[in-house]
C-alpha cells in the first residue's frame, strides 16, 4: 500500500476530534495487521472505490472512549452505545473519509465514497478481505484508546 | 431507491449458494428496514461507489447457517466462526457483489467495488448511515435464515 494513503486519514481524524470534541488525540506508531485481531464495541466502516484504487476505512472504539467523545460533541451525557452514539460514529466515519478524500485528490488520487455502516456489539472483530496490507493506527486519548484500520489496493 | 437495484443481488446470492453450496435458498418478501435492528453472528459488508450511485451490501448470518454453508462449500466440518468461516463470508460477499455488478452494468448502472470486510461477534447489529431506504431480504434455508441488506443512494 502506498504510504501516501495513510497520512490524510490521520490528519482528518485528529482534525475532527480536536475541533469538534475538543479532545486531545495522540496517534501511535502505525503497524501492519498480522494475525492478531483487535476488538472493539462499536465500529464505523466505509468503502472507497475508483478506477485507480479501492479500499476500506474502519474506525473502532471501545464503549468508554466513544461515550466520552459523544458527550463532548453533543454536550449531553450518554451511558450506553445507543442510536445516538451509532449516529455519531457514522458521522465521524463520514467526516474523516471526506477529509481524507479531499487531501488525496490534491495528490492525484480520486475515489468515490460508499455509504458508512456502523456495527455495534461487545467485542466484535473485523477482518478485511484483501491481499493488500492492512495498516492499523492506534490513538491515545484521556478516555482510553481507539484505532483506525486502513486497507487500500491500487 | 430504484427497485432495479434489488433483483441482481437476489439472483446473485441464490446463484452462489445453490451452485457452490448445493443449498436450496428461498427468498422471502423484501421489506424496508425501519427502527428494528436485526442481529447476526457474522456479517460480510462491502461498499460500492461511482459517479452515479453509492451503496452498501451487507450479508448477515447466524452461526448455525454459516457453519452449514461453509461445511457444504468446503466439504469439511467447522464448529465455530473462525478465520476459515470469515474468509468464506468475505468470499460470498465478493461473489454476490461481483455478480450483481455485472447484471447492473447491463442495465446501465456502473460502480466500483470496495474491499469486503467481515465482522464477527455474537449478536452484533448494523446500522447504515443513509437517508435512502434500506431494503432487507430474508432468505430461508434448511439450516435456518439469513438476510441481506441493501442500501443505495443515486
Image (tube, coloured by chain):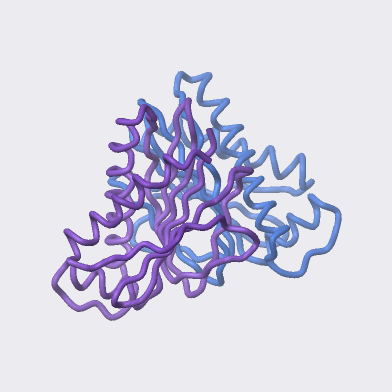
Chain colours: A blue, B purple
- Side (left or right) of B30 relative to B144: right
Q: Which of A97 and B24 is in front in this view?
A: B24
Residue A55 sits in quarter: top left
Report the residue at 48% width, 32% height from top: B53
Question: Which residue extends farthest left?
Answer: B75
- Side (left or right) of A108 relative to A84: left
Q: Nearer the viewer, residue A8 or B42?
A: B42
- Where in the figure is residue B42, as x and y percent of width and height? 41, 67
Residue A100 sits in quarter: top right
Q: Which of A35 and B48 is in front in this view?
A: B48
Question: Which residue extends farthest right?
Answer: A75
- Where in the figure is residue A140, as x and y percent of width and height? 63, 55
Report the residue at 32% width, 65% height from top: B26
Classify B44 as above or below A98: below
- Side (left or right) of A133 relative to B56: left
- Where in the figure is residue B82, as x and y percent of width and height? 32, 71
- Where in the figure is residue A104, as x and y percent of width and height? 51, 26
Report the residue at 37% width, 29% height from top: B110
Amino acid at each position: 500500500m502506498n504510504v501516501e494513503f495513510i497520512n490524510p486519514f490521520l490528519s482528518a481524524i485528529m482534525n475532527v476530534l480536536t475541533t469538534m470534541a475538543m479532545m486531545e488525540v495522540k496517534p501511535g506508531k502505525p503497524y501492519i495487521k498480522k494475525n492478531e485481531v483487535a476488538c472493539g464495541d462499536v465500529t464505523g466502516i466505509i468503502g472507497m472505490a475508483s478506477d485507480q484504487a479501492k479500499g476500506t476505512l474502519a474506525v473502532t472504539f471501545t464503549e468508554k472512549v466513544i461515550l466520552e467523545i459523544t458527550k463532548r460533541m453533543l454536550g449531553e451525557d450518554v451511558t450506553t452505545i445507543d442510536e445516538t452514539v451509532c449516529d455519531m460514529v457514522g458521522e465521524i466515519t463520514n467526516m474523516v473519509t471526506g477529509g481524507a478524500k479531499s487531501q488525496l485528490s490534491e495528490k492525484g488520487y480520486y475515489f468515490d465514497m460508499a455509504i458508512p455502516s456502523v456495527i455495534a456489539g461487545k467485542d466484535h472483530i473485523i477482518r478485511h478481505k484483501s491481499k493488500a496490507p492492512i495498516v492499523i493506527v492506534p490513538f491515545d486519548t484521556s478516555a482510553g484508546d481507539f484505532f483506525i484500520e486502513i486497507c487500500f489496493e491500487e
